[in-house]
Amino acid sequence: MRVGRPVKPLPHPDCDYCGALATLARAGDEAYPYRDDHGPLWICAPCQAWIGTFARSTRNVPLGRLADARLRELKVKLHAALEPLVQAKVRRDGCNVFEARSKGMKWLAQAIGVDPDKCSIHTLDADQCERAIAVVEDFEQARENHPSDSAADDR
Ligand SMILES: [Zn+2]
C-alpha cells in the first residue's frame, strides 16, 4: 500500500498468458474482437485474450483476468452448468437472479478453495473453471440419484 498518493492509479490489467500489459479497446477499434458493442475490453492482441469492464465503471475497471479462447469457452460452459441451479433457486426461494448467481458462485468458490469474497466467474482461471464445472456436474449427478435431497446452495 503506497502512502501519499491521492490519485489511485488506473486499473491496468496484464495478460496472464504473456505478461504484457493489456490495451483498452472500444467497439470499432481495429483490435476489438466483436462486431457488436460489448463495452470497452482489455485486450492482449497476440494472445487473443480479453476481458470486459464493469458496466458502470468510468475507470474501465476490468471484470477479472484476461481470458483466452479456451478460458472463454470454459466460462460459457460453467455459466451454462450453473444456470439451471440458479433458475431453480429463483423459483424455489423467490430471490432475484443476481442474488441466486452470486450465492451459486460463493458455493462454488468454497468448493474449489477460492476466496468467495474475491470470486466471480471472471476471476477464475482455466483450471479453477474446470474444477467448478466438475463440482456442478457432481452436484447434478447426486441430485439425480437422490431427488428428495434439498439443494446444496443453502450451505
Ligand atoms: Zn498476452
Image: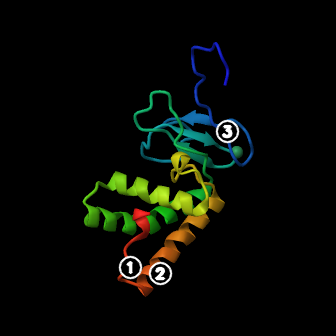
70 w.r.t. 42: above or below: below
Q: Position of residue 29 (x, y in %)?
A: 53, 36
Amino acid type of the residue tagged 1 in the rendering: Asp
The answer to whether the residues at label 3 and label 2 have Cβ atoms under 8 Å apart is: no
Q: Which quarter shows the N terminus?
A: top right
Residue sitting at x 48%, y 81%: 141
Residue at the bottom extreme, as displayed: 145
Amino acid type of the residue tagged 3 in the rendering: Asp
Q: Is residue 113 visible?
A: yes
Residue sitting at x 57%, y 39%: 42
Q: Is mark 1 within 8 Å of ligand 1?
A: no
Q: Does the residue labelled 3 lie within 8 Å of ligand 1?
A: no
**Lower sequence index among marks 2 and 1:** 2
Q: Name the residue under label 2.
A: 142
Q: Residue 14 carries which label?
A: 3
**Lower sequence index among marks 3 and 2:** 3
The answer to whether the residues at label 2 and label 1 have Cβ atoms under 8 Å apart is: yes
Q: Mark 1 points at which residue?
A: 149
Real-space Cα distance between discs 1 and 3? 44 Å
Secondary structure beneath label 3? loop
Q: Which of marks 2 and 1 is in front?
A: 1
Residue sitting at x 60%, y 23%: 9
Q: In this view, does 128 lie to the left or right of 26?
A: right
Secondary structure beneath label 2? helix
Amino acid type of the residue tagged 2 in the rendering: Ala
